[in-house]
Image: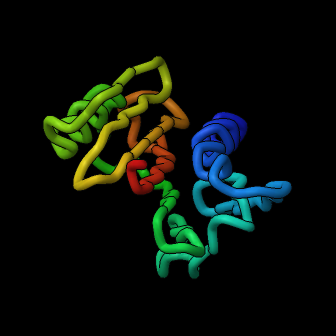
Amino acid sequence: MRHQLIIFAILSLALLAQTTTGQIRYESYSNARFDYSIDYPVNLLVPQRESTNGDGRAFLAKKGDAKMLVWGQYNALFDTLTNAYQSDLEERGADVTYKILLKNSYVISGTKAGKIYYQKTMLSGTDGDGDATFATFTIEYKKV
């Protein structure tokens, strides 16, 4: 799961990088509680303090036009990946322009209030098992 989260973060943030000049330098944020990590461009995003409960972190664009969130959560309600996917789709509403449910992850993307959002959620462990965890990465930026 760690590898997938890093790849999708880099690909998504490449959209932001296109608007800057020079070389993009990446650093890694690792979360020990939920065993995930994500690379982020340090010349575009500023890491905020880790959340009080240690589940994740926010990263804000230096210009204030983008926000990236990453967090993990236990599957305390024994939810399935399909149910989590359906719930997130309902929460996003009619503005979804891309969605896909895979074996161990899903992606939801769209536009809302002049911004583009992208979400990837990955399951680690057995689907529907209370010991499983979900790791989610979201990015939101102004539509150009």
Side of 134 where 9 appears, left or right: right
Looking at the image, is 1 positioned above or below residue 62?
A: above
Q: In the rendered view, does 30 fall on the left or right side of 48?
A: right
Task: Quadrant for the N terminus, please.
Answer: top right
- Give the quadrant of residue 113: bottom left
Q: Tell me where residue 22 sits by quadrant.
A: bottom right
Front residue of 49 and 95: 95
Q: Nearer the viewer, residue 19 or 80?
A: 19
Q: List the single residue furthest toward the top.
A: 103
Q: Is residue 21 above or below residue 116?
A: below
Q: Is residue 143 left or right of residue 82?
A: right
The residue closer to the viewer here, 12 or 128, is 12
Location of residue 27 in the rendering, given as x and y in whole percent from the top left corner: 79, 61
Q: Position of residue 41 (x, y in %)?
A: 72, 59
Question: How many marks do you count on the picture?
Answer: 0
Query: x%, y% of residue 30?
Result: 70, 60
For image coordinates 57% across by 81% down, the residue present is: 49
Tell me where residue 109 appears, x and y as whole percent. 36, 36
Question: What is the basis of the colouring in this image?
Answer: rainbow
Nearest the viewer among 125 and 134 is: 134
Q: Residue at x 47, y 52 (%)?
A: 139
Which residue is depicted at the point 39% across and 49% down?
A: 143
Q: Residue at x 21, y 43 (%)?
A: 92
Give left or right: position of 141 versus 37.
left
